[in-house]
Amino acid sequence: MNVNLYGAQGKWIMVDLGMTFSGSEYPGVELVFADLEFIEERREDLLAIVLTHAHEDHIGAVPYFAADLGVPIYATPFTADLVARKLEEAGLLDEVELNIIPEDHGPIPIGPFAITYVPLAHSIAEGNALLIDTPHGRIFHTGDWKLDEEPIIGEPTTEEELRAIGDNGVLALVCDSTNVFNPRASGSEGAVHRALMEEVARHAGKRVVVTTFASNVARLQTLGEVARETGRRIVVAGRSLERIIEVAQDNGYLADFPEPVDFDTAMGLPRGEVLILATGGQGEPRAALARMAEGNHPIELAPGDVVLFSSRQIPGNEIAIGRVQNQLAARGITMVTDRQAFIHVSGHPGRPELEALYLWLRPQVLVPVHGEMRHMAEQARLGKVCGIPAQVVQKNGDLVRLAPGAPGKIAEVRAGRLVLDGDIITPANGEAMTMRRRIAAEGLVVVVLLRGQRPVIEAVGLPLDEDLPEFLDEAAEDVLAAIGRLKGRDGRDPEAIREAARLAARRAAQRWSGKRPQVRVIIPGAAA
């Protein structure tokens, strides 16, 4: 998620408005957003949202918040097209001003700022840095980037052009930290092109599946050429791949991409004449690759067929990816990852690329972003070693001054996360999510108290199995005994009765199972 704010003369711009995908910490939730309370309170001074590129962690929250923020959005054509489709799906296209900016456009005046798009290579079409002119100096915000002499798609800004920006002075470099621990450069898409060509050619007579990030248009261009040169027909399996191909072609990319064939046609072709592009390289359970691994997809794989993982494992997805790979292995499918062949390169800079950018831009201040705290702290150390005079390591909620005066943190504001829970955006640490996590970890006991009757108890998620009937009987006895010990007014107070029953049922559950479940006590006719 990437929400960065800059202030000048009391005005703000926002760089990117992204989201992240949920993990096990938010059961039942897929999308996680930054809580925008701070900027919403200053909405009248927010001038614009400027998007660097079209990855979900940079644009994914736009349809959820842009209309409420009520400011124009700026993006280059490919990014703008994807954003427009998201807004249209949400019924908001007419409510948000979306400005399409050609990559070769000059400075865009936005209040006291002037924004210039600076193309840089990344694992998506039209990755851009932003050169932000302010009254106190220029900020170079890299977005996500890398150096690539053979990018396949697009023409990144050259070393000479970046040196010229540095010659004109850069106050601060706000820089991607994701790959700072990599001692080598990220590598070229051109080298991946050659490696994929060799790898697919090695598996003549076999059905080959390639899974990659759908947004990597350069990789899709490569795979189209690989299919053509190895005499294979392209099959596209996955809605996100279909969408990216459509948007890319609408914006002048993938012009010579082979016409894909449908699943039925593909299954009727000889095995060595098919190249399948599939979603699911991160182990997503509903994606095409997972369904192929399970054997319930129209594309059928047989022993000896090949799956190329032309993508890296995103941290946190190892178990899900391993599950899919184990299923493929059990079916006799050959797998090749970037550990066996050079079939993937990162879209983020390694240390040599960071050092080169520092040398070319010569900023006065380095502000690491995009990564965990360990990545940002390490980049700050690298910047210091490379001679950048000042480094500011910040965390969510920090307000940082770059100029005038000494750079550094000047205040801290509340920062949090929101989740899309069903159709409702709610605090990530709210009662509903907290309760769901507790239930997931400890289970649930429901106690229903009916006047003149024995308590009715249900246990969900407790490891009792055949002991369950005995537990329920003993828990009911404990609840009756606890209520019976209430004296005077407490014996008639629904709240006191509810609390006594809750504690008794919970103690019984802990005694029987070692778990401390959530306990819900229901007294029909009494207020909750």
Image (spheres, grey):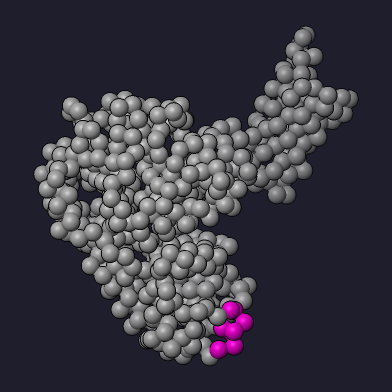
* Residue 410 horizontal side relative to residue 462, left or right: left
The image shows a total of numbered marks equal to 0
Q: Nearer the viewer, residue 512 or 57?
A: 57
Q: From the viewer's perspective, is residue 49 above or below residue 264?
A: above
Q: In this view, does 524 lie above or below 509?
A: above
User: For the point 18% across and 27% down, which residue is it?
Assistant: 405
Apparent side of residue 15 relative to residue 91 in the rendered image (left or right)? left
Q: Quadrant of the N terminus?
A: top left
Which SS type dominates the magenta stretch?
A: helix
On the question of residue 446 being in view, the answer is: yes
The answer to whether 490 appears left or right of 372 in the picture is right
Residue that protrudes farthest toward the top in the picture: 488
Q: Does the magenta stretch include residue 265?
A: yes
Question: Residue at 35% of width from left, 78% of height from top?
Answer: 196
- Tell me where residue 362 appears, x and y as whole percent: 13, 46
In the picture, measured across the screen, residue 514 lies left or right of residue 82, that is right
Percent x, y for residue 236?
52, 73
Q: Name the residue nearer the viewer: 383 or 149.
A: 149
- Say if residue 358 shows up in the picture: no
Percent x, y of residue 406: 18, 28
Q: In this view, does 199 lie above or below 237?
A: below
Q: Quadrant of the C terminus?
A: top right
Q: Is residue 277 above or below residue 385?
A: below
At a point 43% along the width and 44% down the height, the residue shown is 73
* Residue 414 magenta-highlighted: no
In the foreground, 317 or 276:
276
Q: Along the line of sight, which residue is nearer the eye, 209 or 324?
A: 209
Q: Give the range drawn in magenta.
A: 262-269
Residue at x 87% of width, y 28% of height: 453
